[in-house]
Amino acid sequence: MVLQAQGLHEQSKRGEMLSRRLVALIEDHADELTHGLIEDLHTNPRTPEYHKLPRSVIHRRMYEIYHNLGEWLGHENDAIIEAHYTGLARARITDRIPLSEVICALILTKNHLREYIRTAGLANSAIELYQQQELNRLVGNFFDKAIYFTAREYERAGKPMDASTELAVDAQER
């Protein structure tokens, strides 16, 4: 029983090391990942407004996500993610990028990252595969928050009407 517990502990340590290795690998290859994503954004039919943005503008934001992945995933407090994606939303509103395209860009960013995690080929055991899946879960949660904070800022910028404003507009139209 003690040997089994030691074995599980060793597998768990290897799994944690895998997660750290994967995150470090992603951070080390951030430039490569970013270039692949930019190419996708500039050619994807669902992101036509991104085709007009200079690659350098896209590069800075996307590189920051990949290069600092460990920090992003390690935040217990959503305030930093909120601040970053509120800022991203404001920048894209200024660039006149529709929300649907910004969300598509975030999904593409996540998908490129997940594909890299899948193809890195570092999971050689069940526990390492579990850690890889856990990293994918954390990545999914991170991008869910990013999409939420981005969409919320777009809504705030749109200044939706409240009920009294709607009544006044309806009365004027009659």
Image (tube, rainbow, N blue to C red):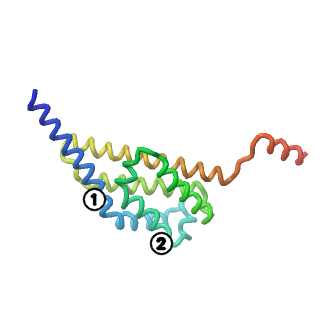
Judged from the image, the secondary structure of the residue bearing numbered disc 2 is helix
Of the pair 30 and 112, the residue shown nearer to us: 30
**Residue 126, picture quadrant:** top left
Q: Residue at x 49, y 62 (%)?
A: 44
Residue furthest to the top in view is: 1
Left or right relative to 7: residue 22 = right
**Mark 2 is on which residue type?**
Ser
Say which mark, if any, is on residue 56: 2
Reading the image, the residue beneath label 1 is 25
Say which mark, if any, is on residue 126: none
In percent of width and height, residue 13 lies at 19, 43
Judged from the image, the secondary structure of the residue bearing numbered disc 1 is helix
Q: Quadrant of the C terminus?
A: top right
**Residue 115, picture quadrant:** bottom left
Of the pair 16 and 99, the residue shown nearer to us: 16
In percent of width and height, residue 158 lies at 68, 53
Q: Quadrant of the N terminus?
A: top left
Residue furthest to the left in view is: 3
Q: Residue at x 74, y 46 (%)?
A: 161
For marks 2 and 1, the one nearer the N-term is 1
Q: Is residue 170 above or below residue 68?
A: above
Q: Is residue 123 above or below residue 94?
A: above
Q: Is residue 54 above or below residue 125?
A: below
Q: Residue at x 28, y 59 (%)?
A: 25
**Mark 1 is on which residue type?**
Leu
Spatial distance from mark 2 to mark 1, Cα to Cα?
Answer: 23 Å
Left or right relative to 138: residue 8 = left
Q: Residues within 10 Å of mark 1 (few under 14, many from 20)?
A: some
Q: Residue at x 60, y 52 (%)?
A: 153
Residue furthest to the right in view is: 174
In percent of width and height, residue 86 lies at 55, 54
Q: Is residue 66 above or below residue 17?
A: below
